Amino acid sequence: MADRVSVSISIGGRLSADLLGELIEKANAENLSTEWDGEPFTANNLPDGEPLVLRGHEIANGTIDEIEDFCCTNDLPFWRWSGGAPGSFPAEIVIWKGVGERRAFTADEDGRPVLTSDEAGEIATLDHLREHFATGAYLPPPFVLVPTTAG
């Protein structure tokens, strides 16, 4: 049986209106909402001028791979935090800024990046240390729904 923990994801960028239904379907399949323990996510819950934040409790292994993959496929930068399951896995932050690989950071239960002793051994300079914490605290751009382009 999978460990179940809380998850929060902040999604930014521009999404074509014709893809909104797919995002809503994926979010509701994971029981994510714009509020902790909130109602199912709908188009009425879209933010204005800020990232879309989806939250949920009891997420298997703290992963929402289909939503992250959807974001990467559709150029939607994100920041995701998952709580830890003692004895199984630590809390983590995963970010994707719209290019390159996803980056994972060890986190605390409040969604802040931390350093393990192994990670600290990889930090060579004070600038690298600052970059580690700044990147782990990444805030995606606002989420914007754009009209479907006629093809």
Image (cartoon, grey):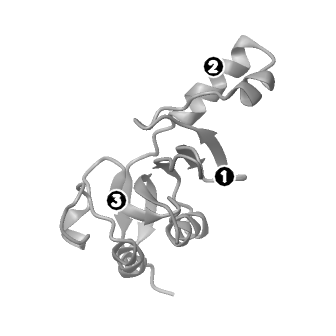
Percent x, y of residue 43: 24, 72
Q: Is residue 88 above or below residue 114?
A: below
Residue 68 is left or right of residue 147, and the answer is right
Which sits in the foreground, 56 or 71? Answer: 56
Q: Residue at x 52, y 44 (%)?
A: 91
Q: Earlier in the sequence, mark 1 or mark 2?
A: 1
Q: Determine whether 36 is above or below 30 in the image.
A: above
Q: Residue at x 57, y 44 (%)?
A: 90
The Cα–Cα distance between marks 3 and 1, rounded to whole angstroms, is 23 Å
In the rendering, which numbered label is found on residue 102?
A: 1
Name the residue: 34% across, 55% down: 52
* Type of the residue with mark 2: Arg
Q: Which residue is mark 2?
A: 130
Q: Residues within 10 Å of mark 3 (few under 14, many from 20)?
A: some
Q: Is residue 20 above or below residue 86?
A: below
- The numbered mark, 3 or 1, whose residue comes first in the sequence reads 3
Left or right: residue 88 versus residue 139 is right
Question: Alpha carbon of mark 3 to alpha carbon of mark 2: how far?
Answer: 31 Å
Mark 2 residue crowding within 10 angstroms, few (<14) / some (14–19) / many (20+):
few
- Residue 57: numbered disc: 3
* Image coords of residue 151 (percent x, y): 51, 87
Cα separation between marks 1 and 2: 19 Å
Point out residue 72 in the picture as x, y percentages from the top left corner: 60, 64
What SS does tag 3 mark?
A: strand
In what element is the residue under mark 2?
Answer: helix
Of the pair 85 and 121, the residue shown nearer to us: 85
Q: Are marks 3 and 2 in contact (CB under 8 Å)?
A: no
Mark in the foreground, 3 or 2? 3
> Which amino acid lies under the numbered mark 3 shown in the image of this protein?
His
